[in-house]
Every structure is written in C-alpha cells, then in structure tokens.
Image (tube, rainbow, N blue to C red):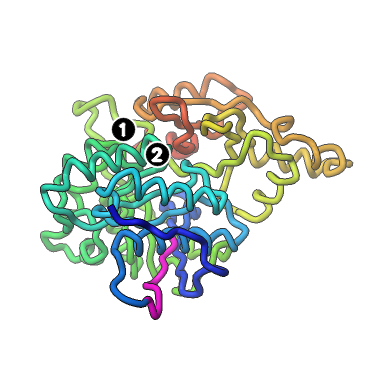
C-alpha cells in the first residue's frame, strides 16, 4: 500500500478553484466544491493516490482560509477509495486538521474502475459512510462503474458527466439518458448535480427533468470565491410527477440539503458570526462529538433575540443552546409526506427545518418544510 504524505504545506494552494453547489429550488448555495491542480515541479513520478489525497486536503485548507461554514465538496478517485482504510484514514485525519467534521464534507467518488475492484470500492464507500461523510458519485452516465454500486453506496448525490449535462437540452437521445438517470436517482432518494451549466435553456431543461443541484459559468464566474453572490436563477415550470402507485411517494432524502453544523458548546457570538457571514443557512444544527444533533438554531428567532435591547450583551458570551430548540428529527428513509405531517404537529415551529438522521442517529442534513410543501403539491 502506498505511503501517503499528508503533511500540511506552507500556506495553501494558490491554484485552488471554488465552485458553489446551487439549489435550484431556492437559488441558495448549499455547498462549495474545491479543486486544486497538480503539484508544480514535483520530482519523479507521482503516486496517484498520494496526489489524490494531496489535492483533496489542499482544497480543504484553501477553503478554510475563507470565513465560510458551508459544507465542502471534494473529489477522490474510485481507485484511491479502493485502497482502503489506510488511505481513507489519512484523508480523514487531514480533513480533521482543517476543522471539518465528516458530516460537513461531501466526498465525491469519481472515475471508473476495473471489475476486479468492485468489492474494494464498495468497502471504501461503506467506510466513508460509517465515518459520517456524505458520499457522492461523479461522472454518472459515462464512467465504467456498475449502477448497483450506487444502490449499495446510498449516496447523498450523483454528479452527471459534464458533457452529458451539456447536451441535455439538445433534444437528442442523451436527453432520454439524463431523464432515466434522474428517475433512477430519485428512486434511490438521491440528489442529482448537473455541472457546467452554460445557458438558461440548459438550466430550465435540466430542472424540468428533475435535477435539483447545479454548477457552472451561468451561475458564477471562474474566479468566484466563497461569500460572493451567485446568479440566483430559479427555473419555473413543472418538475416530473412521482407515480404514487410505484411506492409511498418520494422519500424525505430527496429534499435533503447539507446542514451547517457547529459544536453543541458553541457560543452565541460564534453562531452569530456564521449567520452574519453566510446568507443561505435557514438554521444551524449543533451536534455532539458523535455528530448527533443536540439543538437547532433557527436563523430568524436567533437574530431577533440579538436585535433586541441589550441583545448582544445578554447573549454573546453564553452558549448558543440557550437560544436554540430541540431538533425535529426524521430518519432519511421516511416518506416525505410523513415528514410533512410531523412538521405540522407543532404549530409554533411548523416551518422550522427538519433534521435528517442516518441509521445510527447522526446528522445527514436538513430539509426545509417549504420544499416539502412545494414537492407534495406537484
């Protein structure tokens, strides 16, 4: 097994690129993808797995230089994931050094792999999920990877091949392929991310096929940095209807968005700093050391408490949990209609975000009640 050098470099990568992941339902940025180019002037041949981990960690460090708590998306090749726990442990340790907890990171497994690696890739993906990471699969539609790996991997998102997404509005057979892949992903309770969106026509067509997340030059310039605005285009028109005879309807995981999380002992001033910096989060989830939700901070009520007389003096140095609420938890496997009914049981908090948990109670993300209402009305 390759020995990886994951020691932090001096400073951060100067060639880091950032791309927001935009929710087409609201126009909000829900995550930030980082990419780092090859190491210049590296002596001798470069081990692919070492280079993979280096790029992922330098991208994470580059994002840590910006005052954002939005979830991070990084790419790791499937062949690197197949190397197993030795490599993944080094990746995990490096991400922890940047201050990122697993539920704040989407690890997008990219590229095809040989059939002989199928079991190893599946085991590596299972290890990532066990550690609490949100898992994605990249290059959907063109990479040489069996689709049943997606079923077993329970990914948070699948990323279309950029060329496939680019031709989705052409009316060709590729459109039919995109529609089939989106339908497949929805039945798994998984989001679809379309990269490289260049035109409003392409965006509208992808949205009409059921794509929820997007990236590309239409939304942001190449030199975009975290904290800068995006071109908030929310396509109009009907999304595909779910067939109620097929199952119990869409799962709540179809509406899942990455959560902005903080430690459950965070102070109110720390939470205020995040909410003042980020425009997108409607709530912040306070989690314990095992990534289990302990409290939720509703943005509107929290900021209202600070806006009152002596608000800052009264709350800033106190635990944020004093201004938080008990989280409204829903398992990722429940039908969306059941989650909507659960939201309606508390009249005072009917529009508060729901916190989605995995099989052992860890935070996977949040669901906005407004998204459930829109989805159930179609």
Disc sitting over residue 61 in the figure? none
Work out whether 211 lies above or below 365. below
Q: Position of residue 125 (x, y in %)?
A: 30, 42
Residue at the location (19% across, 66% down)? 170
Please state which of residues 260 and 99 is positioned toward the viewer in this rendering.
Answer: 99
SS category of the residue bearing label 1 = loop
Q: Which residue is located at x 57 percent, y 69 percent?
A: 11
Q: Is residue 292 left or right of residue 301?
A: left
Q: Which mark is residue 255?
A: 2
Residue at position x 56%, y 33% in the image: 289
Q: Residue furthest bottom?
A: 41
Left or right: residue 198 versus residue 94 is: left
For residue 183, say whether it is visible.
no
Relative horizontal placement of residue 306, taking residue 105 as reference (left or right): right
Q: Could you tell me residue 364's position as x and y percent?
A: 44, 36
Quadrant where the C terminus is found in the figure: top left
Picture coordinates of residue 51, whole percent (x, y): 35, 64
Magenta segment: does it hold 307?
Answer: no
Judge whether residue 40 is colored magenta.
yes
What residue is shown at x 59% (from left), y 62% (from top)? 66
Q: Mark 2: which secondary structure? A: helix
Q: Which mark is residue 250?
A: 1
Q: Position of residue 49 (x, y in %)?
A: 31, 59
Residues in magenta? 34-42
In depth, the one of 92 and 292 nearer the eye is 92
């Amino acid at each position: 097994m390759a020995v990886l050098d994951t020691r932090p470099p001096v400073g951060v990568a100067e060639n880091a690129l950032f791309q927001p992941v935009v929710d087409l339902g609201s126009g909000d940025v829900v995550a930030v993808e980082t990419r780092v180019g090859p190491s210049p002037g590296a002596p001798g041949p470069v081990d692919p797995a070492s280079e993979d981990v280096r790029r992922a960690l330098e991208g994470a460090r580059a994002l840590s230089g910006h005052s954002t708590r939005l979830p991070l998306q990084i790419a790791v090749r499937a062949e690197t994931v197949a190397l197993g726990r030795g490599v993944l442990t080094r990746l995990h340790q490096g991400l922890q050094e940047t201050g990122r907890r697993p539920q704040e990171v989407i690890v997008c497994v990219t590229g095809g792999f040989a059939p002989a690696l199928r079991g190893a890739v599946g085991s590596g993906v299972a290890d990532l999920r066990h550690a609490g990471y949100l898992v994605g699969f990249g290059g959907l539609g063109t990479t040489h990877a069996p689709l049943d790996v997606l079923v077993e991997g329970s990914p948070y998102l699948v990323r279309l091949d950029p060329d496939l997404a680019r031709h989705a509005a052409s009316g060709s057979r590729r459109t039919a392929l995109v529609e089939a892949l989106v339908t497949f992903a929805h039945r798994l309770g998984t989001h679809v991310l379309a990269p490289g969106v260049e035109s409003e026509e392409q965006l509208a067509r992808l949205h009409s096929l059921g794509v929820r997340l997007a990236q590309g030059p239409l939304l942001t310039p190449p030199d975009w940095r975290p904290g800068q605005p995006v071109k908030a285009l929310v396509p109009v028109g009907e999304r595909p209807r779910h067939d109620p005879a097929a199952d119990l309807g869409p799962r709540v995981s179809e509406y899942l968005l990455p959560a902005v999380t903080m430690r459950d002992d965070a102070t109110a001033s720390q939470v205020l700093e995040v909410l003042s910096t980020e425009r997108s989060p409607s709530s912040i989830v306070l989690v314990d050391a095992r990534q289990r939700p302990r409290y939720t901070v509703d943005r509107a009520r929290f900021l209202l408490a600070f806006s009152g007389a002596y608000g800052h003096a009264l709350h800033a140095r106190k635990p944020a949990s004093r201004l938080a609420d008990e989280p409204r938890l829903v398992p990722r496997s429940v039908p969306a209609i059941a989650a909507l009914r659960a939201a309606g049981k508390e009249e005072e908090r009917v529009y508060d975000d729901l916190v989605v948990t995995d099989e052992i109670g860890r935070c996977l993300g949040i669901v906005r009640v407004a998204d459930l209402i829109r989805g159930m009305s179609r």
